[in-house]
Amino acid sequence: QGYTLCVLYLALGSAATKVRKQQKEAAGIGEGRGGRRGPENVWGSAATAAMCALAGRKWPQKQSVLAVAFVASLATKLSDTLASEIGKAYGKTCFLSTTLKRVPPGTEGAVSLEGTLAGVAGSLVAAGYAFKVGLVGWWPAVPACAVAAFVATTCESWLGASVQ
């Protein structure tokens, strides 16, 4: 079941990367490799999910909490990917997350309403899927995963604006 959530992230992340691909590439903000994503996009950025899955095997009594953490980590990754890709494609007004100064789409640390809403939707899709396949219960796991994803993607935007 957990593997299928990884596949869902890979499929939706790849699809989002291809949205307005030519426009993003022309602006110099397109994803590398022609927008294709591979297993390293899941596992390279989902070490937390892998650690939660392994810890669930070692400590079965903590499995329900670790399952929520597993889902939240992948919901966060999907949220971040959708926020970034949809924000670059459709973001009408982008702001730097640290100063709220207007910046062009694709700027590190930039946020837009369109990207933010896509990110929230992505986290809800991932958490809802995890509920449907029996990885987590509905309450409080699905809302907790969505909130965790929002907080994490917001923090990543702040880091992107500050450090990168």
Image (cartoon, rainbow, N blue to C red):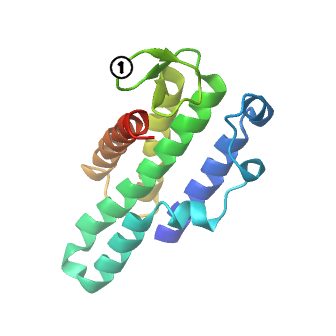
Q: Is residue 123 left or right of residue 36?
A: left
Q: How dense is the environment of label 1, judged by Cα within 10 Å: few (below 14), some, or many (20 and up)?
A: few
| Residue at (33% x, 49% y) in the render | 145
Give the structural element (helix, strand or loop) at label 1. Answer: loop
The image shows residue 25 at horizontal and vertical percentages of: 76, 35
**Residue sitting farthest toward the left:** 61
Q: Quadrant of the C terminus?
A: top left
- Using the image, determine if residue 63 lies above or below residue 22: below
Amino acid on which disc 1 is placed = Thr
| Residue at (52% x, 64% y) in the render | 44
Query: In the figure, residue 65 lies in which quadrant?
Result: bottom left
Viewer-proximal residue, 100 or 143? 100
Residue 133 shows in the view: yes
Residue 1 shows in the view: no
Kindly identify which residue carries mark 1: 99
Viewer-proximal residue, 7 or 30? 30
**Residue sitting farthest toward the front:** 163
Q: Is residue 77 left or right of residue 150?
A: right
The image shows residue 27 at horizontal and vertical percentages of: 73, 28
- Using the image, determine if residue 64 lies above or below residue 102: below
Tally of numbered discs: 1
Q: Is residue 58 left or right of residue 92?
A: left
| Residue at (36% x, 34% y) in the render | 158
| Residue at (62% x, 67% y) in the render | 39
The image shows residue 139 at horizontal and vertical percentages of: 26, 49
- Using the image, determine if residue 53 lies above or below residue 153: below
Query: In the figure, residue 74 lies in which quadrant?
Result: bottom left
